[in-house]
Image (cartoon, rainbow, N blue to C red):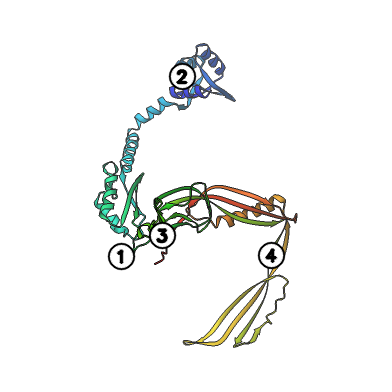
Amino acid sequence: MPIMNLWYYMNGYITISIRGSRSERLINLAINRGIILRDIRRFGSIAYMKVDIDGFKKLRPLARRTRCKVKIEKKAGIPFFIYRLTVRRGFVAGAVFFVILLYLLSSFIWFVDIVGTEEVDPHLVSELSRELGLKPGAFKNTLDLEKISNEVVIRVPDISWAGIEITGTRARLEIVEKVKGEEPGEVGYSHIIASKDGLITDIMVISGMAEVSVGDTVTAGEVLISGILRADFPEVEEEDDDSEENRIRESYVRSRGTVEARVWYEGSGVSTLLEKKYEPTGKYSSSSYIKVGDKQFYTRGDGQNPFTYSRLNQSRRIIRWRNFKLPVEIVHLQYNELNLVEKELTHQEALDKAVLQAQEEARKQLPSQAEVVEENVEILDTEDEQVIEVRYVIETIEQIGKEKPMVLDS
């Protein structure tokens, strides 16, 4: 049926109404003549139906013959749509112009973002990119992105890499700054150590020697990439062991590389089937006193709490004279009464509350760059059936390597 509706729409059809005492005679004649009528409905003395364009032309003589009045209620389909477009040439021209204009505008760069600048002046990079042609209003197809990136690296000594990414009408120039070295005459050696416990999933060594492999479990502080390079020397005779050449069997570098690992974060949550909440009743008791040194002089009330459950709000004001602070203090106390409300929770409600608490605790530990891989909830056994305790574990993949300077014995 949907295919037939599509066919009728492509060829066009007309919704008509037939009025007259011989409308049934008209319908029968039309069917006998091979005119296809669809969705025939009758409301009182009026019949509604759908007919194609050719069928409507053949129907008009039959309407005059049966003295019935045929009225067009609606025209639908592609032929009528095309006809309306030919009549409304101004509208069509405006729509075509709008599409062309939109295409042209989307072919230009309108926004340029500079990211990755910490030590390098972003205005310097922005001006340089403008000079090289990467600026608002630049035609995207005329830009040589690789050439611009290389020029930025060559002209700015503190930049080690630059890349350009264009999304729509926005260009993103990302740079990586060079790592500042040591002062002349000063040698900096270092290890890359684990910043937290984890399971190694990937390791890339730029300089140094890998001390762990993929699949190893490491703990915080463990050396991942060592700055000590050890060479294998052939065995020598004992009398030559004390020679300076044989004693030098290792060299030192500043370690560089990345280490990726699976890291787990845990949060715990506890809930009871009997929930206790304290709600304010609106009643309160206030007191005020003047404190001079260690002595208190009440000006209102006695400072006692008359309620079983309450919340204390306290304010203090120190007396000053010109620029001097006097040993006089005005203290205001206000006890707001609280009402203990107990509510019995279902097992599922208490479980949901404990899970939410554990989830929030675990998520607070997540670093911003961590990629969450999996989240699990574990219900713990408790001796009290009224208490529900859960552990929420979030598994992530993140970079755990951090540089640690190496201290060499002089």
Q: Is residue 333 left or right of residue 256?
A: right
Q: Marks 1 and 2: in contact by CB < 8 Å?
A: no
Q: Of label 4 and label 3, which has the lower sequence position?
A: 3
Q: Nearer the viewer, residue 328 or 357?
A: 357
Residue furthest left in the image: 131
Closest to the observer, 377 or 292: 377
Residue type at the position of mark 2:
Phe
Residue 190: assigned label: 3
Please tell me how crowded label 4 is: few (under 14), some (14-19), or many (20+) other residues with Cα within 10 Å. Answer: some
Name the residue: 72% across, 65% down. Answer: 340
In front: 392, or 160? 160
Q: Element under label 4?
A: strand
**As shown in the figure, which amino acid type bears the numbered disc 3?**
Ser
Q: Are marks 4 and 3 in contact (CB under 8 Å)?
A: no
Q: How many marks?
A: 4
Residue 185, which numbered label?
A: 1
Instruction: Check disc 3: other Cα within 10 Å, few if <14, some if 14-19, many if 20+.
Output: many
Q: CA distance from mark 2 to mark 1?
A: 98 Å
Q: Identify the residue shown where x is 27% and y is 48%.
A: 148
Q: Residues within 10 Å of mark 2 (few under 14, many from 20)?
A: many
Q: Quadrant of residue 146?
A: top left
Tag 3–tag 2 contact (CB < 8 Å): no
Residue 269, x across and y down, in percent: 64, 56
Pointers 3 and 1 in contact (C-beta within 8 Å)? no
Which label sits on residue 56? 2
Residue type beneath disc 4 = Tyr
Q: Earlier in the sequence, mark 4 or mark 2?
A: 2
Label 1 neighbour load within 10 Å: few <14, some 14-19, many 20+: few
Residue denoted by label 4: 278
